[in-house]
Amino acid sequence: QIVDVRLRRILDSRGNGTVEADVLTESGGFGRGAAPSGASTGEHEAIELAPEEAIAAARERAVPRLVDEVYAGDQRSVDAALHAADGTDDFSEIGANSAVAISMAAAKAGADMLGAPLYQHLGGAFRGENFPIPLGNVVGGGEHAADATDIQEFLSAPVGAPSVTDAVFANAAVHGEIHDILAERSIPAGKGDEGAWAPSVDDEEAFEIVAEATETVSGEVGFEIGFGLDVAAAEMYDEEDEEYVYSDRTRSTEEQIDYIAELVSEYDLVYVEDPLDENDFEAFADLTEKVGEQTLICGDDLFVTNTERLSQGIEQGSANSILIKPNQIGTLTDAFDAIELATRNGIEPVVSHRSGETEDTTIAHLAVATDAPFIKTGAAGGERTAKLNELIRIAEDAL
Ligand code: PGA
Ligand code: ZN
């Protein structure tokens, strides 16, 4: 039984305020969760309120429905209470930031009560033994850094790694190698919101640098390291002119599809997220038809972890992968349901951080619990390594 829910405003990695929740149970169980926050947010995401506002609304509406009412170990009841307290379909009353913080805190309190690690509580005894491959953001721009690449993220993908630890260190090595390459080329190397290098280079040069770095490190570690992208194309799409706006040119939807397909074959990309606008299920389907056999076409802003949008995507064949961000939808139950629907339909779930993060490690546990084949949580920087180091600890225990 939940006996107390405490909410507070804490700092996120960008220095903004975010919501942290503590959940306490009758038997002494304790859990703490903190909401992350996006910069290139999808238009259809659940609503994040100002932290003060979200906290006040959750105290008034959600806490009374949880305290002395619900068991922390019963995640569906916790999350149903959050939905009932909010009453809308996008958490615009209590804020998806309050909802997700409480949802994650309750899950941890539930695990604590059982004396089980969170991944075990969330995944149960029938969890598989594969580890999620970390996709490491190593170069980026878009909404995450000014004056850098148009493409938001270049992601190191150590697909041949024999263990999660090897994979985590491979991504860090690629990140380090890129620093060296930038130094050789006398390119100043600042960092973006997720800790990726944010050099002032065009996308073409970024491809060259990332391809060189992944190849070099792959040679050193002796297993395959590919790379992928988060284009975050909704951020460059001009709805009025129906074109994608790059620094040096524009592309029509057709040209964008061809461009991405060329990149997939030229660089053997293993993963491409949001290559097209967040409302263009059809263009997504055209691209997936073209290159879906060779690579993962992942919907982030397209699906926003929402089962209704995912169902539409499944119907239209829009993608073969979905990004899973619990705060896009507001609760762990909703995120879990999206993963389940995806998996049943052959869509690969990729569990993901946000550009604004905290030390919270729930997503590492969620990825292991659900047998997700990939987790996207950066390559370097404290709020990113919190999750990566947790993965290493979980692997010691379970994988
Ligand atoms: P965001 O970016 O957290 O700023 O939305 C991450 C992503 O687009 O995957
Ligand atoms: Zn994305």
Image (tube, rainbow, N blue to C red):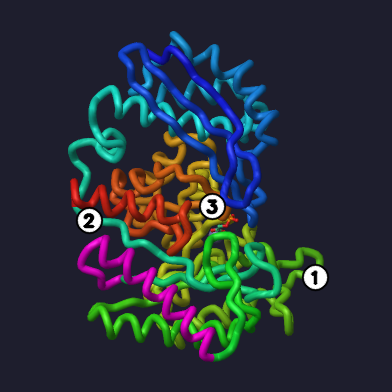
Ligand 1 within 8 angstroms of badge 2 C-beta: no
Q: Is residue 210 positioned above or below 67 on the image? A: below
**Which disc number belongs to residue 370?**
none
Does the magenta run of residues contain 298?
no
Q: Which numbered disc, 3 or 1, marks the residue that appears first in the sequence?
A: 1
Q: Are marks 3 and 2 in contact (CB under 8 Å)?
A: no
Task: Specify the quadrant of the image occupied by residue 48.
Answer: top right
Q: Residue at x 62, y 52 (%)?
A: 14
Ligand 1 within 8 angstroms of badge 3 C-beta: yes
Which structural element holds mark 3? loop
- Name the side, left or right, on which 347 lies relative to 223: right
Can residue 293 be seen here? yes
Q: Which numbered disc, 1 or 2, marks the residue that appears first in the sequence?
A: 2
Query: Which amino acid type corresponds to the residue marked 2 in the rendered image?
Result: Asn
Q: Residue at x 40, y 28 (%)?
A: 31
Q: Tell me the magenta residue range.
A: 159-184
Q: Residue at x 41, y 19 (%)?
A: 24
Query: Which amino acid type corresponds to the residue marked 1 in the rendered image?
Result: Asp
**Which residue is farthest top?**
68
- According to the picture, the residue beneath numbered tag 1 turns out to be 241
- Name the side, left or right, on which 142 lies relative to 284: right
Query: Which amino acid type corresponds to the residue marked 3 in the rendered image?
Result: Arg
- According to the picture, the residue beneath numbered tag 3 turns out to be 354
- According to the picture, the residue beneath numbered tag 2 turns out to be 130
Tell me the mark number nearer the camera, choosing from 3 and 1.
3
Chief secondary structure of the magenta portion: helix
Can residue 262 be seen here? no
Q: Position of residue 332 (x, y in %)?
A: 43, 36
